[in-house]
Amino acid sequence: MKIAVFGATGLCGKNLVEVALNDGYGVKALIRNPTKLDHIKHENLEIVKIDIFDVDAVSKQLEDVDAILSCLGGLPTWRWKKETVYSTSIEAIAKAARKANKKRIIALTGARQVPDPEGREGWFIRNFDWIVMRPIMDDMMRMESYLKENCQDLDYTVLRPTGFCKTEPWTGEAIIVPDVYFRPEDSLWIPYKKVVLLMLEALKENKWVKEHVYCAMPNGFDKVEK
Ligand SMILES: NC(=O)c1ccc[n+]([C@@H]2O[C@H](COP(=O)([O-])OP(=O)(O)OC[C@H]3O[C@@H](n4cnc5c(N)ncnc54)[C@H](OP(=O)(O)O)[C@@H]3O)[C@@H](O)[C@H]2O)c1
């Protein structure tokens, strides 16, 4: 199976490329800066420099892939700024997918897009989200609405992970709950490698189709017993 990967130069995307290649997938990385993947050499990796918003160019590149996985995203920024990469990229990707006759899209947004009504994130996280996460969270919400309202003809999955950490190994299974933004009983962190594995699980097992699922780890997942 061959997958197209958007955001393949980011923290999660690079890991997705490596894990997918090791798993036997063909990978086409659709990126704006190919030198960022210079460190990965593999016969099943194709690197294409592309403007991800160019629907015609992207659709041509999607013709020979079976599924589209996106780790695209923006960075935290001051709350008065506007982020658009989530909503504009998903619109371009969905249009390109239809043009290339492809249906399966697995993409990432994030947890806590809506503040917990009871403020159970805690003072620090709540203020951090308010000050620098609001622009990306607002655009994640626009992206998810676009999928829900305009892409019911596509087999999309949105994963909403909590904050990424590097922890490895870990104990316990991820907690997957549809249509939830936050659960106070879970850890605020998830290994980005686990998120990559969940993306590939969604693909292999055709799971969570047309669902927007919160992904977290149980508290204490990072305390591996010897
Ligand atoms: N990091 C976290 O703690 C966390 C937690 C929950 C959810 N998430 C979500 O998970 C996803 C991946 O996160 P990450 O930490 O791996 O992100 P990241 O390291 O910031 O990577 C973002 C990727 O998106 C690409 N990108 C951004 N704007 C682009 C544009 N205009 N054109 C082409 N490519 C563009 C970047 O390309 P360049 O390398 O060329 O800049 C990079 O490959 C994001 O959606 C993020 O919101 C992250």
Image (cartoon, grey):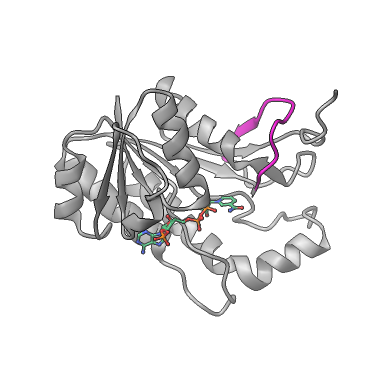
Residue 151 position by quadrant: top left
> What residue is at 80 percent from the left and 39 percent from the top?
185
Is 81 left, or right, of 128 in this rendering?
left
- Residue 195 shows up from this direction: yes
Measured from the top left, where is residue 51 in percent x and y? 25, 60
| Above or below for 128 versus 152 | below
User: Is 31 or 176 nearer to us in this picture?
Assistant: 31
The quadrant where residue 220 appears: top right
- Above or below, 55 relative to 16: below
**Residue lying at 66% horizontally and 73% vertically, measured from the top left:** 131
Outermost residue to the right:
226
Locate residue 28, reporting x and y percent. 29, 40
Which quadrant, please, contains the C terminus? top right
Q: Main secondary structure of the magenta part?
A: loop
Q: Is residue 187 shown left or right of residue 69?
A: right
Residue closest to the eye, 222 or 120: 222
Q: Is residue 101 a member of the stretch shown in magenta?
A: no
Q: Residue at x 59, y 76 (%)?
A: 78
- Quadrant for residue 189, please give it: top right
| Residue 88 relative to residue 109: left or right | left
- Whether residue 209 is visible to the viewer of this picture, yes or no, is no
Magenta stretch in the rendered image: 165-179
Q: Quadrant of the N terminus?
A: top left
x, y (%) of residue 178? 57, 35
Residue at the far top in the pictured view: 205
Q: Residue at x 43, y 27 (%)?
A: 22
User: How many marks are shown on the rendered structure?
Assistant: 0
- Indicate the position of residue 66 as horizontal and vertical percent values: 26, 30
